[in-house]
Amino acid sequence: IEFIRSYYYNKLELTRFSSSVGKYVGFTEYGVRNAEYWNNNPSELSAMKAQKEGYCLHNIQIWYNNM
């Protein structure tokens, strides 16, 4: 299970957080700047890492039961 949060503008992906990587990755110049800023903020990274347990693992049983 992987938690991914992507930020888009005009159908262009700027930045993505992936729980398997554990940090933000930028895909444009603006996205790289945002990723560097967010990666230097330990509370932001820990909040995103906690989303895997809070969102994905909490709902996985519900999703599998409905299939």
Image: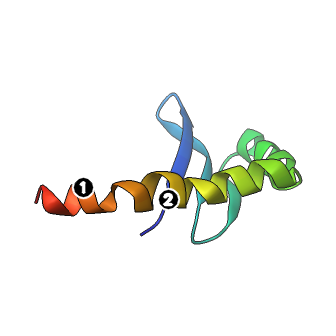
What residue is rendered at 75% in x and 55% in y? 45
Q: Whole-percent x and y of residue 65? A: 15, 61
- Image depth: mark 1 or mark 2 in front: 1
- Height in image: 23 above or below 13? below
Q: CA distance from mark 1 to mark 2?
A: 16 Å
Name the outermost residue toward the left: 67
Q: Which residue is mark 2?
A: 3
Q: Circle 1: is it few (<14), some (14-19), or many (20+) Cα within 10 Å? A: few
Q: Mark 2 Cα within 10 Å, few/some/many (few <14, many 20+)?
A: some
The N terminus lies in quadrant: bottom left
Q: Residue at x 24, y 55 (%)?
A: 62
Residue type at tag 1: Ile
The residue furthest top is 10
Label drawn at residue 62: 1
In the rendered view, does 23 fall on the left or right side of 3?
right
Query: Which residue is rendered at x = 10% and y = 60% of the image?
Result: 67
SS at circle 2: loop
Give residue 14's quadrant in the image: top right
Q: How far across and down, in percent of the image, does residue 42 sit?
A: 85, 55
- Where is residue 36 shown, x and y percent of the image? 84, 52
Q: Amino acid at mark 2?
A: Phe
Pick the front one: 26 or 40? 40
Chain-order first, disc 1 or disc 2 = 2
In the picture, the disc for residue 44 is: none
Residue 58 image point, x, y percent: 41, 56
Do the CB atoms of the residues marked 1 and 2 lie less than 8 Å apart?
A: no
Q: Is residue 37 above or below residue 53?
A: above
- Residue 25 appears left or right of 42: left
- Name the element at disc 1: helix
Is residue 26 toward the left or the right of residue 33 in the image? left
Is 17 or 53 nearer to us in this picture? Answer: 53
Q: Which residue: 77% across, 48% down?
A: 44
